[in-house]
Image (cartoon, grey):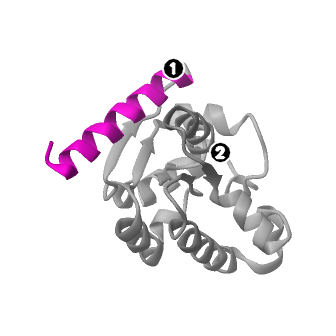
């Protein structure tokens, strides 16, 4: 289960990782949109962040009950204690950690990010880093998502995941 702030590369790296490991890939945000029948921006506008987090919790819980797969979560999913516990119970959490300048650059490439609307992107992301990074440290694995070719980050992710699984199995 990939966690991290928006722009860390959870969806892009998740797709490449799934392909490399021959596993299905699921983007939790896309599943939330399907379940809600409207965009994430609309959920935030119409019902608020709390309603979005409730749907997110239920969708991720359902996804964790499926077969082995790579799941990309939204940036705030791991902050929810119930979601964090469900991931700990049924998955392996992998934090894609990125520096502020990388996040600012990547998030500027596409819209549809309700938390970034109406403010300075760098200031908002820095606030989210201060709030969320201490919680993200509870992830099973940490991989730095840098300004390098995606293949390099995917390779780092495969190596870290393999080392974690080997350690868990005692090999």
Query: From what the image shows, is residue 12 above or below residue 126?
Result: above
Asked whether, in this view, residue 138 is left or right of residue 145, the answer is left
Instruction: Label the magenta part by its dominant secondary structure.
Output: helix
Residue indicated by mark 1:
148
Residue 147: % across, % down: 52, 23
For the point 64% across and 34% down, the residue is 106
Query: From what the image shows, is residue 107 above or below residue 126?
Result: above
Residue 99: % across, % down: 46, 35
Check residue 162 for magenta coloring.
yes
Residue 38: % across, % down: 85, 68
* Residue 121 - label: 2
For the point 51% across and 67% down, the residue is 64
Query: From what the image shows, is residue 128 above or below residue 161?
Result: below
Write down the region rendered in magenta.
150-171
Residue 130: % across, % down: 42, 54
* Viewer-nearest residue: 109 or 31: 31
Pick the quarter of the image with the C terminus. top left
Q: Residue furthest left?
A: 170
Asked whether, in this view, residue 27 is left or right of residue 154, the answer is right
């Amino acid at each position: 289960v990939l966690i991290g702030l928006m722009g860390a590369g959870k969806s892009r790296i998740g797709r490449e990782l799934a392909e490399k490991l021959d596993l299905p890939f699921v983007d939790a945000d896309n599943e939330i949109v399907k379940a809600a029948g409207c965009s994430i921006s609309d959920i935030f506008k119409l019902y608020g962040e709390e309603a979005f987090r409730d749907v997110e919790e239920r969708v991720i819980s359902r996804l964790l009950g499926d077969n082995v797969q790579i799941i990309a979560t939204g940036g705030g999913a791991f902050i929810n204690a119930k979601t964090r516990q469900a991931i700990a119970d049924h998955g392996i959490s992998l934090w894609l950690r990125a520096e502020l300048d990388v996040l600012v650059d990547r998030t500027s490439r596409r819209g549809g990010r309700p938390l970034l609307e109406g403010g300075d992107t760098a200031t908002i992301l820095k606030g989210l880093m201060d709030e969320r990074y201490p919680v993200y440290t509870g992830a099973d694995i940490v991989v730095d998502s840098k300004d390098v070719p995606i293949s390099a980050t995917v390779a780092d992710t495969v190596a870290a995941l393999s080392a974690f699984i080997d350690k868990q199995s005692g090999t």
